[in-house]
Amino acid sequence: MDWFSAGDYELAREVLQRGIAAIYLVAFLSTAAQFRVLLGERGFLPVADFIRRTSWRQAPSLFRFGYSDRLLLVVTVVGAVVAAMLVLGLPQSGPPWLPLVAFVVIWALYLSIVNVGQTFYGFGWETLLLEAGFLAAFLGSRDGPPPLPVMILFWWLVFRLEFGAGMIKMRGDRSWRDLTALFYHHETQPMPNPLSRSAHLLPRWFHRLEVLGNHVAQLVVPFLLFVPGPVGTVAGIVVVLTQGWLVLTGNFAWLNVLTMVLGFSAIADPPWLDPVSTGESSPLWFVVVVLAASAVLIVLGWRPLRNLFSRHQLMNASFDPLHLVNAYGAFGSVTTERLEVIVEGTEDPDADTGWREYEFRGKPGDPTRRPRQFAPYHLRLDWLMWFVALGRLERWFMVLLTRLLEADRATLRLLRVDPFDGRAPTRVRARLFHYRFATRAERRQTGLYWIRQPLGELIAPVGLDRAGGTRRS
């Protein structure tokens, strides 16, 4: 069955299986550390409330049989252990059904989490991880060569991911078309990293080249992924390198790292590489399973394909509750100014003095603090705070203020600095600031990484007696 085998992509399969599993491991660890505070029994948006409002058909999940924080912990531990085994390559050393089962297990467990995760799991990279994990289940083991239909479906996934992102930019903000988007993006992205300021301060001609290179990488190169051999290999390398630049200059959870892993699917084995697989062909049952799964994914891919060329293109959209074939895209519009919400508390009963800032782990706050690197780890609360500053003041934010007024220990563990060392403040408030990166001269003179100016109150001072009725001022 030579037509079924992609014998020149054995290294690509190793990178895909181990790389995707590594991201699942990070995702499960991130969930174990944050989910119970954000969505647990006493979370900001409790899973139990969400399940009562929705049906199994809308959001299938293991937790519909009964959610508990203990069950959540079991799910994350099991998922992390299976993912770690895949990273080590243990299931891949057995028959092809073994990695198939292992990937289906971590996909199903993480699907159960994402489908009840609400806004805290409403990011495109969650859906991307689910689609990649399900597809990886059919890559087989070292008993035989990689299946060609599955490798082509990986190329199709990378195409949708890159071309979709390119099209959403061209249809969206004018700054992508006039090559000025990166005059602002490094500074205004949701969570800058240690090199974001250096990237922002590069000459404007370089930023124009960045945008032009982005358009080539996302609108031209994806078509070359489907050409086997050197052409497809070069296209895969371009995807890996361009995504690597995004890793160096931003904190986008595992989006860019996972895209780099997926980009390896197009990179053929170098001629000096010894074959990895020990078998000459795949068993008949595995061929049938792969072809059946491929047929299902091709049928489901019709709507995402139409979406790519639609005038009303959807960004980061799932067309089925299992997240099997999806639409992707990011930053169709670019904000030109950075707004930050700073949460403060005071122990003064009259709330006139003594205001101190709560510091988040990843989002900008203290102007003297250099942004940190967290990706591929996902700081979900910090990311959602960026949307609050853009005007998306949701119910979970009011619950956050209540938890701070209660000095809730679990909530405080999500923060970098509790200015009251575990004591409960009498009042909290949220203020809006304008932030920009300090110039090189300002950095030398003041020692600041950020220059900020207050814009007013987003939430007026409230205590526990009024926190439930907090409203925008």
Image (cartoon, grey):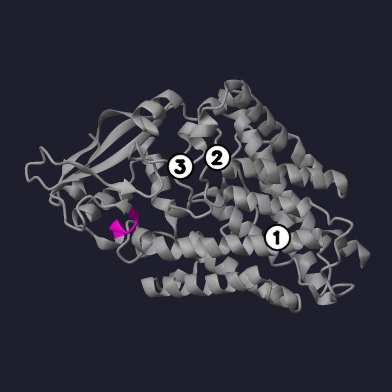
Check disc 3: other Cα within 10 Å, few if <14, some if 14-19, many if 20+. many
Kindly identify which residue carries mark 1.
Answer: 16
Q: Answer whether residue 413 is magenta in the image.
A: yes
Check disc 2: other Cα within 10 Å, few if <14, some if 14-19, many if 20+. many
Pointers 1 and 2 in contact (C-beta within 8 Å): no
Instruction: Give the residue at x 53% y 42%.
Output: 250
Q: Up-down: is 186 above or below 465?
A: above
Q: Report whether 473 appears left or right of 194.
A: left
Type of amino acid under label 2: Thr
Where residue 410 sits, quadrant-wise, is bottom left
Q: Position of residue 454 (x, y in %)?
A: 27, 29
Q: Report whether 18 appears left or right of 36.
A: right
Gap between marks 1 and 3, in whole Å? Answer: 27 Å
Nearer-the-camera pick, 446 or 457: 446
The reply to whether residue 166 is visible in this rendering is yes
Check disc 1: other Cα within 10 Å, few if <14, some if 14-19, many if 20+. many
Check the picture and name the quadrant holding the C terminus.
Answer: top left
Kindly identify which residue carries mark 3.
Answer: 191
Q: Which mark is residue 249?
A: 2
Q: Report whether 243 appears left or right of 390.
A: right
Q: Up-down: is 470 above or below 13?
A: above
Closer to us: mark 1 or mark 2?
2
Check the picture and name the quadrant holding the N terminus.
Answer: bottom right
Q: Up-down: is 232 above or below 170?
A: below
Q: Position of residue 330 (x, y in %)?
A: 57, 39
Q: Which residues are magenta?
A: 411-415
Q: Secondary structure at mark 3?
A: loop
- Of callouts 1 and 2, which one flags the residue occurring earlier in the amino acid sequence? 1
Nearer-the-camera pick, 251 or 449: 449
Instruction: Give the residue at x 67% y 54%.
Output: 261
Gap between marks 1 and 2, in whole Å? Answer: 24 Å
Instruction: Give the residue at x 63% y 57%.
Output: 131
